[in-house]
Image: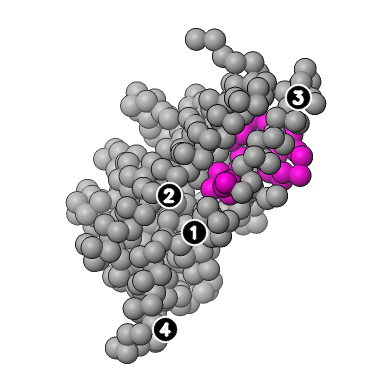
Amino acid sequence: MFLAYRVCMTNEGHPWVSLVVQKTRLQISQDPSLNYEYLPTMGLKSFIQASLELLFGKHSQAIVENRVRRRALPWLILTKRGGLWLVRGGGGVCVPTELHGLVFQDMGFTVCEYSIWDPKKLCVDPNILLNVVEQIPHGCVLVIGNIIDCKLTPSGWAKLVSMIKSKQIFPFFDIPCQGLYTGDLEEDTRILQYFVSQGFEFFCSQSLSKNFGIYDEGVGILVVVAVNNQQLLGVLSQLKGLAEALWLNPPNTGARIITSILCNPALLAEWKQSLKEVVENIMLTKEKVKEKLRLLGTPGSWGHITEQSGTHGYLGLNLKKHIYIPKNSQINFSCINANNINYITEGINEAVLLTEGSEICLPKEKKL
């Protein structure tokens, strides 16, 4: 049983696709007015504008001041292209996942990997991110992944911003599934607006494949936020050359589907509702897993399961019983359904009981 799929799964064990996407895809396929010419290197303009407003909001300071631009492509290529431009300046990069590390390492960066998950405390520790920024070299690139699970307080974010500025660290945000963390599209990216308000320049890669369920299309944007329009044009001229060398023309179908939804109020409302339903279902699954482990009398504290946001979360163990998970124990909770939840929780319980007292056993219930 595999619990580390990157896609969001349904209760039937199939990749989730928003119903509004299926409907829109059918309408587009039957539209005789569409042409299938190559898209420009920049991508579909209407898709790019709609995606940018989704990420920052229609009235974003950066958009109004014309100091933000974007390109459309799959996440991996977007991240790689951003990295190819950044590597020209040399230095290192600090990344939150092994996948990020492989992408940047392939381009010649000196890579260090960090995780804000504390396996001993069984929680996401925001102080870890602060310590990482305090220790990484001056002028380094910092990739920030799940900004929701950072759980920094306003004063914590202010401290982080201060350190990033003083050490001239370049932030590179990665937004893989906006709306699938809290169910609120604006809340999931609110911190980006804070960085804009603080006058930062940064990159942000945003994938739109997971939150629409268009996994085979690989749709996303790379956003460049500069201090002013003059600097932005300089960066874009270099990125355009890289784009022409890497792919020349981005794909069209996924961009058309997403644009049709984001630019239609009725379809947009339907899509937003589908995201909320997915998030609610995942939280319900987490509650069920925690409760079943409690009823089984499984040693350890399991409250951390429901304290995490999004489709993926840390189990807090490195045990295996025909349940294959990454070494950091982060799994995709949408893979758990009525057909396998008993097998999974019983397997966890058995494995913990067999190893109780060893160093890999979970800590006892926390006392408040």
Which residue is rendered at x = 38% and y = 41% of the image? 182
Q: CA distance from mark 1 to mark 4?
A: 29 Å
Q: Which residue is mark 3?
A: 353
Comes first in the chain, label 3 or label 4: 4
Q: Compute the Cα span from label 3 to label 1.
A: 34 Å
Marks 3, 4: nearer the viewer: 3
- Element assignment for label 3: helix
| Percent coordinates x, y for residue 333 in the rendering | 55, 44
Distance between the Cα atoms at labels 2 and 1?
9 Å
Q: Are marks 3 and 4 in contact (CB under 8 Å)?
A: no
Which residue matches tag 4?
38
Circle 4: element type:
loop
- Which mark is first along the chain, 1 or 2? 1
Residue tagged 1: 16
Q: Which residues are magenta?
A: 314-338
Q: Quick check: marks 2 and 3 in contact, CB under 8 Å?
A: no
Residue 364: x, y in percent? Answer: 64, 15
Type of the residue with mark 3: Leu
Which residue is denoted by mark 2 in the rendering? 278
Number of other residues with Cα within 10 Å of mark 2, as a class: few under 14, some 14 to 19, many 20 or more: many
When the figure is inspected, residue 47 is found, relative to residue 318, above or below; the finding is: below
Nearest to N terminus: mark 2 or mark 3: 2
Dot placed on the residue nearer the N-terminal end, 4 or 2: 4
- Residue 352 spot, x, y in % from top left: 73, 27
